[in-house]
Image: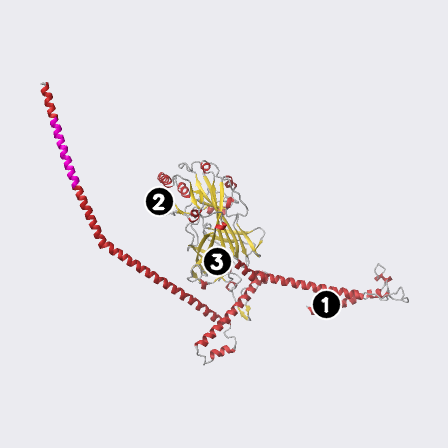
Amino acid sequence: MRGELEKSNTNSSKFADATSDKKLSDNLHETQLLNRQIHQHTEELKKRCDEIQDKLNREIGMPIKSEKEVVIKENQEKDEALDKLKAEIRKWEDRFIDAGEMFEACKQANQFQPFSSSGDLALLNNPTTDHRSDLFEYITELYRQVKSQSEELDKLKKAVYQSEGESTPASRPSLTQPFQVDGIMTAEPELSKLSLPSFPRVTRAHWQDRNFEAMVIMDGTDLGIHKKEKLFSVHYLTIANIDDFMGGGKPLLHQVGPYTYEQSTSKYALNIFPQNGTVRYADKNILRFIPERSVGLESDVLVVLNLGYVAIANNAGKNRNIDFVADFIIRHYYHSQLFLNKTVYEMIWGYEDPALKFINKFIRIRTVIGLYAGKNNSVGPSLEVNDGVKNSNRVGQILSLNGLRELSVWKTPSANQINGSDGSLFPPFLDPTSFVQVFSADICRSLRFHPISEPEIVDINSIPTLRFLLSKQTFLSPEEYPDNQGFCLDYPKCPKSGIIDMRTCMEGAPIAISLPHFNGADRSYLDAVIGMHPRDDMDISLYIEPQTGVILQALQLIQANAIIYQNPNFPQLAHLKDVTYLPIGYSNTSIYVNEAVFQTLMSTLIIPQLSVKIAAWLMVSAGLVSLAVTLSMHFWTRQKTLVVDGGNESTPLLVECPSYSSSDCPPNNFCQSPPEARCSSHSLGSHISAQEQEMEDRLKEGV
């Protein structure tokens, strides 16, 4: 029984295995059929997609391409036509301006001196003078005469204005008094309305629609801003002990530089408002690298601070989500590197930061980091300034920036005020004891400059100038100077004196400015780093010719410092101090006027004054010589009168002068002298008086 049972079990298991194998075989066959069907359908779909794509290309792609080519061609033709039209417009504008100038000149000539002689009047009144050529020649000759008279009038006004500037306030004529020019009495209510060439003036006629190369804001004395040479140099401060610094030690700074650039600035007039007496313009700056004045090339590689890393880390710690995103960005894009290798070219002109580019997808921010990023060969902010026509003391004063009368950067209204000029010129006849103000759009504030305690006259190429220094109050903390409270972004947690936080001015960049090497700053900044060597000349100063208000030389030195906060979430920042101001580098902007400007100033200002002084000296010398000659003649005549005859044997030894008593004789026994001498002596007073009167009359006749 047991054997049969085991046999039956074996047979049943074989049957089950056979049945299972058959099912598997059937399933495999069905799967293969299904795969063949899927493959066939896939091929059919691909084929249909290709057909549809070809059909789309034929029906849509080709027409669109042809239409695009047509549109591009039409746009090119329109651009060419527009360029030609603009060129034609500029040509006609130039002609219109020239014609307007000629018309104004003729108009002024008609008002000033219409006809120089009766012959000119007869020429116009002559009925036979109908030829246009004769009339044109007459107008041309009249224009030449007017131009010549205008040049002579300018020279006369220049001399009058210079002599007036040298006179005392009490001796200056009243502004409402009439003055005489070429024999004509003219009433002038305001002195500022005179078109005097002794200080720069704004010429509105040359502002209309001119390009950058032809545009100069100032005119009049040929001392245009375009003739100032500006050198821009940068010194970088690199860290030699990066690991020690990230471990909490003091950074060892090493100065590299200078890398020097030549900067040219042109002013572009945007609008002119004669009714308001203002002009709105913008600057265009172009920088060119000068290898011969640099220590290396723009391809030099420097180890610099990763400002993108610092900016993101400084904003972390506010909530968990921001911390998570900041940590992801720093690890993924920066690979947790606090310092990077960058070329000088990238540091000046900028490099695109990958992390900031990623953030820009969600928040609109700047993605390029660089000292002069986006500023080379580009137009700066628009400034509206006073043209000085109504009041010469207000010439160049800024009224608005980008259409705004005040800023919205700082914390108080007084800090947001826009005061002063753009630094290109100042009013004429500066008071050597007063201050001047300059508004800098780069640092979003006005700067005040004071002369030194005793006004110092500094000769620049033999031209005397006044030296103005940046006010010491500029970099003081609110604790030392409460008026600076508006410039503190986190009041009362303000930096100590010597540092200005620029985050709101520089679109959130973690930057603070100071003087180079923390010159004049609190001692704690110097103690926090190694390698700083401040000097007194590391400052901002202006050298201004006081009579014209022209800057002959300017030196501007500014240091950029990174603001780094301690953050335990990032290993590179975990061991730093609470706040670290790490110097990055400093720039030195030097402005000089070229030789042509110096020659113009010498010929129009210094030499006339020197001639007056020499003439005065010669007059004094001539007077002294005349006086010496007069005295010599006087004493010679006196000595001749006192000559006494030797006498003879019959001459008595004692002769009494009857008209004088013995009491009149001096104690030296003068009465014992020869009689001629004694009598001559007594009559000498009246005789000398007569001689003096005669010499005085001769001197008066000679003078």
Whether residue 621 can be seen here: yes
Q: Which mark is residue 696?
A: 1
Percent coordinates x, y for residue 242 in the rendering? 45, 38
Q: Which mark is residue 358?
A: 2
Q: Quadrant of the C terminus?
A: bottom right
Percent coordinates x, y for residue 130 in the rendering? 44, 79
The residue range painted magenta reads 14-36
Indicate the amino acid at tag 2.
Phe
Left of 669 or right of it: where is 378?
left
Looking at this rendering, what residue extends furthest in the bottom direction? 128
Q: Quadrant of the N terminus?
A: top left
| Figure colour scheme | secondary structure
Left of 58 or right of it: where is 513?
right
First in sequence: mark 2 vs mark 3: 3
Residue 615 among those drawn in magenta:
no
Mark closer to the observer (1, 3): 3
**Could you tell me which secondary element the residue under label 1 belongs to?**
helix
Please tell me how crowded label 2 is: few (under 14), some (14-19), or many (20+) other residues with Cα within 10 Å: few
Q: CA distance from mark 2 to mark 1?
A: 98 Å
Indicate the amino acid at tag 3.
His
Q: Which mark is residue 226?
A: 3
